[in-house]
Image (cartoon, helix red, strand yellow):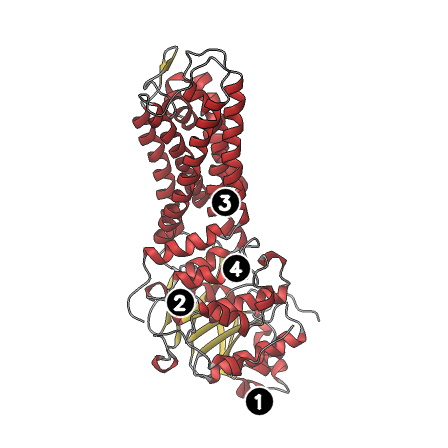
Amino acid sequence: MRRKTPTREMGGSPVPGGGRGSYRHPMIEVRELSKRYGATIAVDRLSFDARPGAVTGFLGPNGAGKSTTMRMLLGLDEPDSGQALIGGRRYRELPWPLREVGALLEARAFHPGRSARDHLAALAAANGIPRPRVEEVLGLVGLEAVAGRRAGTLSLGMGQRLGIAAALLGDPGVLLLDEPVNGLDPEGIRWMRTLLRSLAAEGRVVLVSSHLIGEMALTAERLVVVARGRLLAQTSVVELSARSASLEEAFLELTADAVEFRAR
Amino acid sequence: MTGHYRFAHAARMEWIKLRSLRSTWWTLAVTVAAAAAIAVAVGVNTEDATADLTNNALAGISVGLLLTGILGVLTATSEHSSGTIRSTLAAIPNRPLVLAAKAAVFGAVALVAGEAASFVAFFAGRAALPAGVAGPALGQPGVLRAVALGGAGYCLIGLLGLGLGAVVRHTPVAVGLLVGGVYVVAQLGAALAPVLMPYLPIAIVANSLTVVQAGMAIGDVRFLSPWAGLGALAAYAALALAAGAWLLAERDA
């Protein structure tokens, strides 16, 4: 599959009227955020920031509350208390959400019977994004050749690329990506890493959740480490690495108390 | 870019989503074909020339409207089962607006398809009548109304399905409720409490909307007039949609 480098393409044509120069560079602010599902506390008075210009890794073991926090940032789940703000506003207050925030929530957030192109066209129409932008993002993620196929026939990695295309559709200043390298082959992982770093270098806010410390070490500069819904550290990759023999070691020490099952 | 997303944006999104699924088109095509096929079968076997031949030609609606109902259910539930709902709500966070746009777009499509099915059934049924049996004409009193309201019946059952789908979110449960509510309850109601019979959706379609002579009666049971029937069916659909909109706004996606 032919893949284009993101840096060459991204400078291309921003959404008319919402151009690069007009970014306000909004920040992600999570303040004392809590969410409980029945007896389970998914997120527990969590506070952190993600700033423009750097990839912020949102790191924690499975079940740490990363996805729940992402869903609350997007207004999909309602917090029990606290705030999840983007540029000082709640998501549902955004006038054109996809032009300000792009999100990849999980491998599949599209109908298997609908083509990638139609999926993106529907989202573009919803936020007044010009139709040619659909072809642009399809090219950007290397899906042009399969854009007319029913999305259910796409591989896991192609599905992730479609999710990235949807996130980039409105040329947003803020990107929220939940486990974006899931299902990608090594080449795809490298592609994603380059893309995320270039998006941040353009001055965007890039928050990427992962449970893979090794991947975060290569991709992120800032780290927000959580476990059991609580903030364990808000730091940089360099700082955290310096705490122990390696970043992995430092991460495991930090999360040691919070992990339920660990082989001895 | 100034302004804010509006109903028109949500409607455009819903139209693209609806038209881009093959299942939409073949379901509607089968709906029209089934109505015509049943009309022909009934027409060919007509013996009593004094019967309501318009109502006979529209007999297939009672069966075929289940298809529009299920399409309505799927239009809501498939978003949840596929995860598309999260993409949809990320684009349009105003949830009642999303469901209103979905209802408007799906309702319009179901109405057009329903009218097509009803009119095709009417003409096919009339053409299939045996020689010597005079067919009804649209110009005769009540005939055009019966055919047009028959088409509206598909649309309203479809919207009822959409509302139920938004309420329960799971396809099998919503389809079960729709089939149970439209068909099974009608059978039980007829057996246990005949007084309820005129208010049951299937009875409204078969005995209120699609009759030439308003206010038909079977035994002690007097059915609703066509317009009262239309109002009752619209009220059921509106109630299901309002509940769906409220729950969509209340629940986590």
Residue B229 percent location from the top left of the image: 34, 27
Point out the tag, 2 or 1, that comes first from the N-terminus: 2
Residue at the disc numbered 1? A242
The quarter of the image holding the N terminus of chain B is bottom left
Q: Disc number at residue B43?
A: none
Amino acid type indicated by mark 2: Ile
Label 1, residues with CA under 10 Å away: few <14, some 14-19, many ≥20 = few
Amino acid type indicated by mark 1: Ala
Q: Is residue B138 shown above or below A102?
A: above
Amino acid type indicated by mark 4: Ala
Residue at the disc numbered 4? A109
Q: Are marks 2 and 4 on the same chain?
A: yes
Total marks placed: 4
Q: Residue at x 40, y 33 (%)?
A: B151
Estimate the spatial distance between the alpha carbons at disc 2 and disc 3, rounded to whole Å. Answer: 27 Å
Q: Mark 3 — on which chain does it sit?
A: B
Amino acid type indicated by mark 3: Leu
Mark 4 vs mark 1: in front:
4
* Mark 4: secondary structure: loop
Toward the viewer: B120 or B226?
A: B120
Q: Are marks 4 and 1 in contact (CB under 8 Å)?
A: no
Q: Mark 2 — on which chain does it sit?
A: A
Estimate the spatial distance between the alpha carbons at disc 1 and disc 3, rounded to whole Å. Answer: 54 Å
Q: Residue at x 49, y 66 (%)?
A: A166
Q: Are marks 3 and 4 on the same chain?
A: no
Q: Are marks 1 and 3 on the same chain?
A: no
Q: Disc number at residue B74?
A: 3
* Mark 3: secondary structure: helix
